[in-house]
Amino acid sequence: MKTKTQNSKFYFIGGGIASLAGAVFLIRDGNISGEDITIFEADKKIGGSLDAQKLTAQKAYCMRGFRMFEKKVYSCTFDLFASIPSLKDPRKTIQTEFVEFNKKFKTRSKMRLLEKEKIINAKPFKMKLIDRINLLLLLIRSETSLENLRIKDYFTTAFFQSNFWFEFATTFSFQAWDSAIEIKRYLLRFLQDASELDDTECIYSAPYNQYDSIVLPILKWLKKQGLNFKTNCQVSDLDFEKIKNKKRVKNLTYLQRKKQKQITIGENDYVFITVGSIIANSSFGSARKAPRLCVKKNIAWKLWEKLAKQDSNFGRPSSFDQNIQKSKWVFFTLTLRDTTFLKLLENFTKEKAEGAGLITIKDSNWLLTIALPHQPYFLDQPKNINVCCGYGLTSDRKGNFVKKKMSDCSGIEIITELCRHLGFKKELTKILRTSTCIPCLLPYITSQFSPRKKSDRPKVIPKNSSNFACIGQYCEIPNGIVFTVEHSIQSAQMAVYGLLNLKKKITPIYKGQHHLKIIYRAIKTVFR
C-alpha cells in the first residue's frame, strides 16, 4: 500500500539548527531517507547563528554569539542530541558528552556583577516592593492583556536599576523596550532557576563552541545519511496553489551562481521555511576596524515579507524588522595569546577564571558582559591560546573611557574599554599586544523580542497548509521562548510530526509553575 511519504521529497529553506534538527527528526522518527532531503542555505557555511571559525589571516577566532543550556528547559534539544554520535568518541552521543562535561566542569559565577572595579553582592535583587509584587503578578497575566506592551510599560523606572534586572537582562539579552510577553515566558520557563540567577549554576555549557559541539557532529551524521546540502543558494520565492480549501507549495525558486532555477514540488513533497533571521546583515570588524552597519534586507527577511503579503497566516515580519536601533548589539570574541588578562581576572575571585560564567560590568555605558568558557573552546585551539567572548547590550551609547559608540569601535578600542573598567590600566599595553578582539555587529539579533501580537508570528503549521511549515525563531510556539536553540529545535519537531502525521508525542515543555516547591522557592527568592 502506498504511504503518505512514499517517493516524497523534503526541502528546508535555511541552513540553521532548525533545518538540521528537522532533517534528523525526518530520518530518525519518520524513517525518511537522507537522500530525499535537501537543505538550501544562502551562505557558504551551514549552521546559521551557531557559527564559530578561525580567521587565519588575523590569527584569531570569531563567533556571532554563544549559547547556554539548561537541562529542564532544553528537553527537546537534549532529545535531539541523544541521537547524534560524538565527534571525539562515536560510542557516546553528544547528549552524554554534554552531561559528562557539565558534571566535571560546573559553571559558577562568583563575580556576576562588577561595579567600580569591585565585585558586588548580586544575591539581593534590590527591587522596590511594588516591582517585586508586579513581577509575580506578571506570571498570571494573560498574554492577550500584554500584547504590544513593553517591559518598561509594566515596571517602575527603579526596576531597571535593580540587581535582578542587570542579571536577568544580561543573561537573556532583554532591553527595557522589549516585549512584556517574552519576559513573562522566560520567567515561567526558568522559574525553577530563580535562586541561581546570581551565580548561573543552573547553566549548562557546551564542551566547545556551539559549532564544534553541535553543528559539526549533526552535519557529519546527516552527510552519512546522504543528505543534500545546497550552499550559496538563495530561495527567493514560493508559488502556492489551493486544492479543496488547502494551500500547498507547488514551485520553489532559488538563485545559484546568479542563475535562477525552479523546482516543481510534487504532490507528496514538503517544504519547511525558516522565516526571518537573527544574524541577517551581520558584519565583522577587526582589531583596527569597526564592523559596518548594513541595512539592506537579507534574503530571509525578503522571502518572509513576500509570503506575508500574499497570506496573513504568515504573520507580520514588519513587527520585527523595522527598528534596527532597538534590536542590534555588538558581540566580540577575544583571542588571548598570553595569560595576563586571565590572571588579572583571577585576582578578583582567587579562583580559576575559565568556566567562571557571566560577568557583567554594571556601570559600563555599553553594559559589557563577558563569558569565560572552559578551555580549549575550539577543537583546533593550541594550548597556549585562550578564548573568551562577550557583548555590549547598549552598544549605541558612548563608552566611559573610549568616547565612541561600541558599534563604531574596533577590537582594540573594545579591549581598551573593557580593561579600563576592570582596572587593568597598567597592563593594558601588554594585553593589547598579546590579544586580538574581533567585533561583530548584529542588526537583528534581538528583534524576536519586539513587542507584538500573537498573530504577528506564523504558526508552525499555518492554517490550511497541506505541505509546508514555518520553523526557526519567528514562528509561534505556545509558551515557547525565542532566542534559544530549544525554540528552533522544537519548531522543527512540531513541523515534522505535524505534517507527516506521526504518531509520536511532541517533547513537552517543562512547567515549573505547576510545582508548589518551585513556586515557594521563587517567591522566597523574589522577596529575599
Image: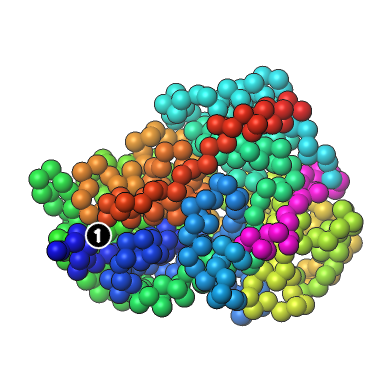
Residue visible at 46% across and 35% down in the picture: 451
Q: Secondary structure at mark 1?
A: strand
Q: Position of residue 272 (x, y in %)?
A: 31, 57
- Residue 20: image quadrant is bottom left
From the viewer's perspective, tell me whether residue 69 is left or right of residue 225: right
Is residue 112 in the magenta section? yes
Q: Nearer the viewer, residue 112 or 187?
A: 187
Position of residue 262 relative to residue 522, above or below, is: below
Residues shaded magenta = 98-118
Which colour scheme appears in the figure? Answer: rainbow
Amino acid type, callout 1: Tyr
Q: Quadrant of the N terminus?
A: bottom left
Q: Which residue is mark 1?
A: 270
Residue visible at 64% across and 78% down in the picture: 380
Q: Nearer the viewer, residue 108 or 335?
A: 108
From the viewer's perspective, tell me whether residue 508 is left or right of residue 186: left
